[in-house]
Amino acid sequence: MSNLVINTDSLKEHSRENHIVKVRILGMVLEYNALSGFIRVQPIINLTQGRTPLDIRLDQQLQLDNAELCYSGTMVDAMCIYDGDFVSALEIKVIRNDFTTSDRETLRAMSEIKNHPL
């Protein structure tokens, strides 16, 4: 079982001394640091709340498996472990937002309803 993490405080409340916990982070990539081998992710729940983003270490070899992770704005679903000091990635999935024509029409209709209520 993993704990959904939304900010640094919730990350620390799941940790216990000398234990590694599995955490899940849903959010948007803000920065990729090639020298340190981490991505900075802002959890999606806190995008507008100005909370501190989380740094996720990619792997020991500092390799980038997916080039999309270095683009700011990429949405990710990350399964990680937290050892009390660092958040290390186990698996990171890129959340695709490819819209079909019907999706675009639905979104356009929704925005028109919002802008011009009945």
Image (cartoon, helix red, strand yellow):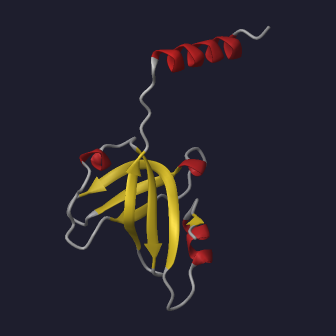
In which quadrant of the rendered image does the N terminus lie?
Answer: bottom right
Image coordinates of residue 65 in percent, x first then y, are: 24, 56
Residue 26: x percent and y percent?
51, 53
Looking at the image, residue 29 sits to the left or right of residue 67; the answer is: right
Quarter holding residue 9: bottom right
Left or right of 60 in this view: 117? right
Q: Nearer the viewer, residue 79 or 31?
A: 79
Q: How many marks?
A: 0
Q: Name the image quarter holding the C terminus.
A: top right
Q: Is residue 101 left or right of residue 39?
A: right
Residue 53, above or below 11: above
Q: Residue furthest right?
A: 118
The quadrant in which residue 78 appears is: bottom left
User: Looking at the picture, how far across and down is residue 94, in whole percent?
Assistant: 39, 46
In the image, 117 versus 102, the foreground residue is 102
Q: Quadrant of residue 6?
A: bottom right
- Name the residue: 55% across, 67% down: 8
Against 117, residue 88 (above or below) is: below
Q: Position of residue 58 (x, y in %)?
A: 31, 64
- Identified at 45% across, 73% down, the residue is 81
| Camera-side residue of 110 and 53 | 110
> Looking at the image, is 73 positioned above or below residue 64?
above
Residue 69, placed above or below residue 18: above
Identified at 43% across, 80% down, the residue is 85
Q: At 47% across and 58% down in the image, what residue appears? A: 53
* Relative side of 17 to 116, left or right: left
